[in-house]
Amino acid sequence: METSREPRWLDAEEQETWLALLSMLVRLPGALDTQLQREAGVSHFEYQVLAGLSMSAERTMRMSELAIFAEGSLSRLSQVVGRLEKRGWVRRTPDPTDGRYTLAILTEPGWAKVVEAAPGHVAEVRRLVFDPLTRAQQRQLREIGRRVMRAVDPDDSCPADRPN
Amino acid sequence: METSREPRWLDAEEQETWLALLSMLVRLPGALDTQLQREAGVSHFEYQVLAGLSMSAERTMRMSELAIFAEGSLSRLSQVVGRLEKRGWVRRTPDPTDGRYTLAILTEPGWAKVVEAAPGHVAEVRRLVFDPLTRAQQRQLREIGRRVMRAVDPDDSCPADRPN
DNA sequence: CGCCGTTACTTCAACCTTCAAGTAATTGGT
DNA sequence: ACCAATTACTTGAAGGTTGAAGTAACGGCG
């Protein structure tokens, strides 16, 4: 059994679809970063980290949980939380129940930052994604996203598969 | 006239949609990069540059056209083409009709590289995006992508709006 | 109790990207 | 014909990301 050396190329319709998706993949993250950077001085990844903490019990998460939530490597998270710590928005402390874990905790100024940044961010998400789509398209997008994610990462629902 | 200070938050359904889209935005590019890096030793952006040249007349493009095609800044392209040049896949020469333009030209080894890399890349795109979707969903995705892009960048159809 | 392997995280170096100048070629106004 | 402005691209420094290696804490098994 072997796959053919010449694959099935994309037909005209598929190419258009692929082009549209690629554009979205490249530019939407850029647009979100731009808005957050301009109005709140944080990257989208930093925002995800702060937002994750703000939504969790005690405003606290283990680094490894937080990495999964924010969809980044532990290494990246470590660097970013280091910076957020320097800015006074997060502090870290070893988990008393297991010294291997590190707990990241949102400080009061960190909470204030999220409260300040969230409305503008949500407005931008609405403007760029939800407003241009019909309700039906929103449902379609959800299903499409799920299917693609299942192909990208079959042990889905947010497993700890990221390396490092 | 002013927008309300408290924006309309995302309802449960919208949040799920947003989560699915975010995952796709973060992980699909990563997956594509991984495959290309492993099987061809190039990043997705480098591949776009080589592929763009390979599809154009004379295997030649102006740097500024190429930047628009590959959806990157001119600065980024300049750096990347510099590296591709060192690897012998591209060469540059000033445009004889207007010395301000620089023509990027795909070399024979560069062409060979594209021919080598393309089948695996197309197969991966099929596996991750087209195979998991029905024909109807592919059409929906195309329309959704277009609408979102129109919101992100209203003077659409690939304008030269990138800074720097 | 004392290793050994695993888990969770951090650090370091290499690399890439971005942003802000800088350079070179051409156009347009006078 | 000249000078200023514009266009197209390049460069350099600052900062972020990645992957590999390092550290520290825990769990299991003899």
Image (tube, coloured by chain):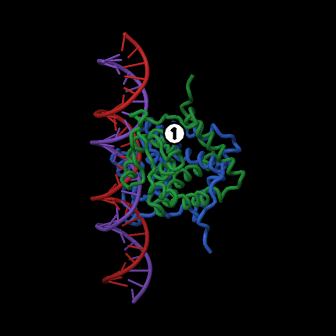
Chain colours: A green, B blue, C purple, D red
Task: Read off the residue under disc 1.
Answer: B121
Of B87 and B137, nearer the camera is B137
Q: Is residue B116 left or right of residue A154?
A: left
Q: Is residue A142 left or right of residue A152?
A: right
Q: Looking at the picture, how far across and down is residue B73, in whole percent?
A: 44, 58
Question: For mark 1, does the 10 Å Cα neighbourhood hold few (<14), some (14 to 19), or many (20 or more) residues?
Answer: many
The residue that appears at 59% across and 64% down in the rendered structure is B154
Instruction: From this view, report whether residue A109 is shown above or below residue A82.
Output: below
The residue that appears at 56% across and 62% down in the rendered structure is B153
Give the quarter of the figure containing the C terminus of chain B. Answer: bottom left
Q: Is residue B145 left or right of residue B115?
A: right
The chain to which mark 1 is attached is: B
Q: Disc 1 on helix, strand or loop?
A: helix
Q: Looking at the picture, how far across and down is residue A21, in whole percent?
A: 58, 49
The residue that appears at 60% across and 49% down in the rendered structure is B18
Q: Looking at the picture, how far across and down is residue B74, in whole percent?
A: 42, 59
The residue that appears at 47% across and 48% down in the rendered structure is A49
Residue B153 visible, this orientation = yes
Instruction: From this view, report whether residue A130 is shown above or below residue C26.
Output: above
Of B9 and D2, nearer the camera is B9
